[in-house]
Image (cartoon, rainbow, N blue to C red):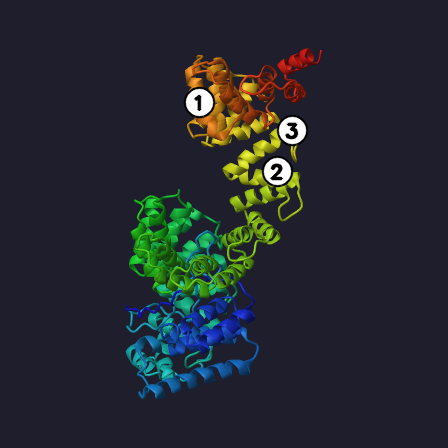
């Protein structure tokens, strides 16, 4: 038999962020009045799928008139039926039908065309469809499975055994069996003479002709020529199904799965889906996969779900192809298999599946399983963006903004980002605000950028919250406001933004924009450190070492310093060298001290250079080398490190490796002594006592000895005792 296959349009997936239904309805109505029928349709679709009756009525109108969506009489009929069944107000339903009829009439008059001839597809009897979406990326399949619209078959099958679904009197007049003709019934049906079609098909159906049974079921399902009656429809579908008709088996399974006219029975639904699926009925294969995936009528079995989804996909079902790709990507029903995922995404893309294009683009963008290619990713994003997929519009905008896979074009970036932002994609709004703030592709307007960032941040965008925190902290486009900076950084930190967590810890430690609180600071440093923020790791080591906000713990301080030092941080490397030199929190080890000083010195860390010079001068952890020490001291001279200044002063005082120069020695000792370095204070005091490089001044010498002695400098204490006695 030949089936006039009519398949429902795919459920439009909306990515608009959640809002109150009343607000979304208002947005849709406003979009419609402004001529943006596509946006209106998208919003109505979202609400309609959630059972919003008014949205279902409005969506039916749009499908009837082809506004914002492809004109589709079947979709219009479906949504009108859904709305009518969900609405307790008969008047509302009737008015909606009149609205649709009037709108279509006006549309035809405006086009100055006669009434269009009803096409075969439009005139076909349809069973109540059950819309379904493709399986979501990271969640179980949606609760509603997929259904194909039933339609009459138009060729008489070979004679079948007599099957009577019910011993009830026909609702309309019927012909004698000898006068009944399946073909004449089909011709009458195509002319919308449903009573005549019924009169031919009913006696044939009672006589066991499977095609007639199926067509009667479809008529009762849709109430065409007869009162809509799902129970009677189920009986005729059952009669055809028992004779092995795959289409009837599928539709009977749908009725059992959804309790339409009969008691919901998932086990029976699975039974009939299985029968139809084994006959290669593609939608039955898809829905059987759905039942296994959700444990409906059978034990949940991800591998069997994948098996049936893949059978449907192999027959070219684009949604099944996308579902299969998602499952291989996630490892549901199979180990994760990037190559298989990419293969199925590609097949779906070839059939125009927007979400598949977006997901495949991510593979190329990240270089996951395929060779990384920004240009290929951009091409895929563009395909989906040009057909209105919000996330793809955002990514295309970002690509134009960054020159990612395409030449930088700020104006095009603005265009795509604005489209996505208008549909409440807040990441797109964030990038759009950056363009507005910087004047890229649009006149710079920091105030407008701040307003947009504020809206996006209040909607929960981590990036916007973090950016606002930095702008208030640094006075970018706004007056410096440490309190506001802390508030926005805290919001981003609470959502897990690692750099924000570090900055919150830093501000708590310093009491900047908030009360000083070392304990809270440590907690935020810890969270940021665990996410790999180097400065947070360093500061956490400092807090443990200093016992600030936490019990003093050299071992934990050492742990974090090592972690940071191994990542190449010069300050941490210097601190490790200092700890190994002094034995603080670790076993004293000059060799390790030299190693860490050397690593930091290679990054021009001047204190490390100075300390490394000291190790060479004394021969600690390395062979003694005064010339090397002198070179290192001189290298560190601009940083005025007290240890290096003092040591270099002694080289000049004693004429070691350089020509003796008391005045130079005094100059170096003075620079170090003014920083409170005890050994420099002692040596400068000695120079004043003996008039070396300066005029002799015993009072000055005494004062310097006293300063050094107060820091337990033994030589100064001895000189002071001798001088005073």
x then y, percent, for residue 386: 34, 64
Judge whether residue 250 can be spotted in this image: yes
Q: What is the number of the mark on residue 552?
A: 3
Q: Residue at x 44, y 77 (%)?
A: 34
- Relative placement, left or right, of 256 versus 489 is left
* Distance of label 1 from label 3 (alpha carbons): 34 Å
Residue 151 occupies quadrant: bottom left
| Residue at disc 3, secondary structure | loop
x then y, percent, for residue 599: 44, 26
Labels 2 and 3 touching (C-beta < 8 A): no
x then y, percent, for residue 588: 55, 17
Residue sitting at the far front: 695
Q: In which quadrant of the rendered image does the N terminus lie?
A: bottom left
Q: Earlier in the sequence, mark 2 or mark 1?
A: 2
**Dot in front, 1 or 3:** 1
Judge whether residue 308 can be spotted in this image: no
Q: Relative to residue 511, is residue 106 depicted above or below?
A: below
Labels 1 and 3 touching (C-beta < 8 A): no
Mark 3 residue crowding within 10 angstroms, few (<14) / some (14–19) / many (20+) = some
Q: Earlier in the sequence, mark 1 or mark 3?
A: 3
Mark 1 residue crowding within 10 angstroms, few (<14) / some (14–19) / many (20+) = many
In the foreground, 173 or 701: 701
Question: Label 2: which residue?
Answer: 522
Q: Relative to residue 433, is residue 519 depicted above or below?
A: above
* Distance of label 2 from label 1 (alpha carbons): 37 Å
Question: Label 1: which residue?
Answer: 632
Labels 2 and 1 touching (C-beta < 8 A): no
Q: In which quadrant of the rendered image does the C terminus lie?
A: top right
| Residue at disc 2, secondary structure | helix
């Amino acid at each position: 038999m030949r089936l006039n296959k009519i398949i429902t349009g795919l459920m439009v997936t909306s990515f608009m962020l959640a809002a109150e239904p009343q607000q979304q309805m208002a947005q849709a109505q406003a979009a419609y009045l402004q001529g943006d029928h596509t946006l209106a349709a998208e919003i109505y679709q979202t609400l309609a799928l959630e059972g919003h009756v008014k949205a279902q009525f409005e969506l039916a109108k749009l499908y009837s008139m082809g506004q914002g969506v492809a004109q589709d009489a079947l979709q219009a009929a479906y949504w009108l039926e859904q709305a009518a069944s969900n609405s307790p107000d008969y008047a509302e339903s009737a008015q909606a039908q009149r609205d649709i009829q009037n709108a279509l009439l006006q549309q035809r008059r405006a086009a100055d065309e006669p009434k269009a001839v009803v096409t075969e597809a439009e005139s076909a009897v349809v069973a109540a469809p059950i819309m379904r979406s493709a399986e979501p990326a990271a969640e179980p399949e949606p609760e509603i499975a997929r259904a194909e619209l039933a339609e009459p078959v138009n060729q008489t099958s070979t004679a079948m055994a007599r099957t009577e679904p019910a011993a009830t009197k026909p609702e309309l007049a019927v012909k004698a069996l000898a006068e009944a003709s399946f073909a004449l019934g089909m011709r009458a049906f195509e002319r919308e003479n449903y009573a005549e079609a019924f009169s031919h098909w009913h006696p044939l159906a009672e006589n066991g002709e499977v095609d007639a049974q199926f067509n009667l079921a479809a008529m009762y399902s849709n109430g065409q020529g007869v009162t809509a009656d799902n129970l009677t429809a189920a009986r005729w579908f059952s009669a055809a199904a028992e004779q092995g008709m795959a289409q009837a088996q599928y539709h009977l399974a749908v009725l059992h799965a959804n309790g339409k006219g009969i008691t919901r029975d998932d086990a029976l639904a699975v039974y009939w889906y299985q029968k139809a699926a084994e006959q290669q009925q593609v939608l039955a294969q898809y829905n059987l996969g759905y039942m296994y995936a959700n444990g409906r009528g059978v034990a949940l079995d991800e591998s069997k779900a994948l098996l049936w989804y893949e059978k449907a996909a192999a027959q070219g079902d684009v949604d099944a192809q996308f579902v299969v790709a998602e499952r291989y990507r996630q490892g549901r029903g199979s180990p994760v298999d990037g190559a298989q995922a990419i293969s199925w995404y590609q097949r779906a893309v070839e059939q125009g599946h927007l979400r598949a294009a977006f997901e495949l683009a991510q593979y190329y963008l990240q270089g996951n399983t395929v060779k990384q290619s920004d240009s290929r990713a951009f091409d895929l994003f563009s395909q989906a963006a040009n057909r209105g997929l919000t996330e793809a519009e955002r990514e295309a905008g970002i690509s134009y903004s960054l020159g990612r896979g395409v030449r930088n074009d700020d104006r095009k970036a603005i265009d795509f980002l604005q489209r996505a932002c208008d549909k409440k994609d807040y990441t797109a709004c964030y990038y759009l605000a950056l363009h507005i703030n910087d004047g890229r592709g649009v006149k710079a307007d920091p105030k407008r950028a701040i307003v947009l960032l504020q809206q996006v941040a209040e909607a929960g965008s981590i990036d916007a919250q973090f950016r606002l925190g930095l702008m208030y902290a640094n006075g970018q486009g706004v007056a410096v406001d440490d309190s506001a900076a802390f508030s926005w950084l805290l919001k981003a930190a609470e959502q897990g933004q690692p750099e924000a967590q570090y900055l919150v810890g830093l501000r708590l430690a310093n009491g900047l924009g908030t009360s000083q609180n070392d304990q809270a600071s440590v907690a935020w440093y810890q969270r940021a450190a665990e996410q790999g923020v180097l400065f947070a790791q360093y500061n956490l080591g400092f807090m443990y070492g200093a016992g600030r906000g936490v019990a003093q713990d050299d071992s934990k301080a050492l742990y974090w310093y090592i972690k940071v030092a191994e990542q190449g941080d010069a300050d941490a490397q210097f601190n490790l060298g200092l700890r190994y030199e002094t034995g603080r929190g670790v076993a004293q080890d000059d060799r390790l001290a030299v190693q860490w000083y050397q690593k930091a010195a290679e990054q021009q860390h001047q204190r490390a250079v100075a300390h490394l010079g000291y190790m060479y001068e004394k021969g600690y952890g390395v062979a003694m080398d005064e010339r090397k020490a002198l070179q290192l001291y001189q290298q560190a001279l601009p940083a005025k490190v007290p240890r290096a200044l003092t040591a270099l002063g002694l080289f000049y005082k004693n004429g070691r490796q350089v020509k003796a120069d008391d005045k130079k020695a005094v100059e170096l000792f003075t620079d170090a002594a003014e920083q409170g370095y005890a050994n420099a204070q002692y040596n400068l005091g000695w120079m004043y006592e003996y008039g070396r490089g300066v005029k002799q001044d015993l009072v000055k010498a005494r004062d310097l000895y006293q300063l050094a002695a107060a820091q337990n400098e033994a030589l100064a204490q001895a000189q002071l005792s001798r001088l005073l006695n």
